[in-house]
Amino acid sequence: MKLIFKLIHSALLFGVSFLFLTACSSLGENSKTLVSQHIKNIRFAHPISEQRVIIYNHGIHRPQLTEPCYMPYNKPPKSLLTMIDMRTMVYNLCSTAKESPAISSAGKQVYLRKVEINHTIDEFLSRGIQPRNLFLAGHSNGAWTSLMMMRDVNKRFNGVIAFAPAFAGKRKEGSFAPWWRNTVRPNQIKDMLKAPTMDALVFAYERDEYNRPQDLEFLSLHYPLLGARGVDLVAYDCGLRNAHQTFRNDCRLLNTSLRIKQFIDNQTRAW
């Protein structure tokens, strides 16, 4: 009986250790070296001093899983792709960051994505791209993480185009995982609002299951729009069943594209 107990005890210890080892948060394959190698192979079609780059960050389904960024729903939306010309390129950053399932790791994936974005910014700057011509963009978790980068705006990049920024799950999941929306989200908002300035164009959609316009008003209240500075919070409803995907099935596509173009042009002139 003692032998059986020892075997069970050892198995449990091994199982816990194995779970701990396999559940660690990580950057996955996105090391600084791999990001650097990929960007070094890019050929720009415009003189480097005038070349514009928009780094696009896709959304995620679960922060504990590697996101299949090759899927169509993780590609940049049409409103952003219309910006592409001889002078402007959109770089789709495929995030491989994921966090441990442990409650204590909740929200860590956002900070790991910030590391990936920083690596990417570093590499574009090393290629000669000017900070005034470098922009971040993203959807959902990718948009939220881009806004979390705002402490470096006007130093290393020139602004953010955010579609439905979110990261703490659906609003209705608050009772299922309350620490996400009641603890982790408020803590990250406090961290986000430490940025001395925030130059961002934020699209928020009515009835969004994650964040409605009123759930993001803290951005425009803390950083009121004054000329080319501050947060321009654009809210509307396309009547879609999945409002969170409005950016991909945009009933105001032409207006959205025009706002993005104006934002980029205004930010560049105001640099």
Image (spheres, rainbow, N blue to C red):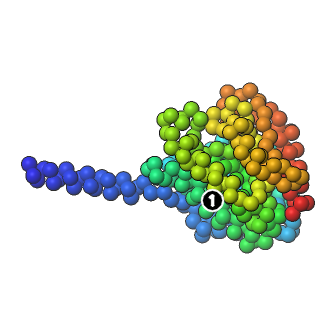
Label 1: few (<14), some or many (≥20) within 10 Å?
A: many
- Name the foreground residue: 77 vs 103: 103
Q: Position of residue 84 (x, y in %)?
A: 82, 52
Residue at 65% x, 68% y: name it.
Answer: 36
Q: Quadrant of residue 204?
A: top right
- Name the foreground residue: 72 vs 259: 259
Q: Position of residue 233 (x, y in %)?
A: 79, 43
Q: Is residue 156 visible?
A: yes
Residue 128 in the image: above or below residue 138: below
- Name the foreground residue: 223 vs 268: 223
Looking at numbered disc 1 in the image, what kind of residue is underneath it? Lys
| Residue bearing mark 1 | 114
Q: Is residue 66 visible?
A: no
Residue at 75% x, 50% y: name it.
Answer: 222
- Name the foreground residue: 64 vs 192: 192
Q: Position of residue 76 (x, y in %)?
A: 72, 47
Q: Quadrant of residue 116?
A: bottom right
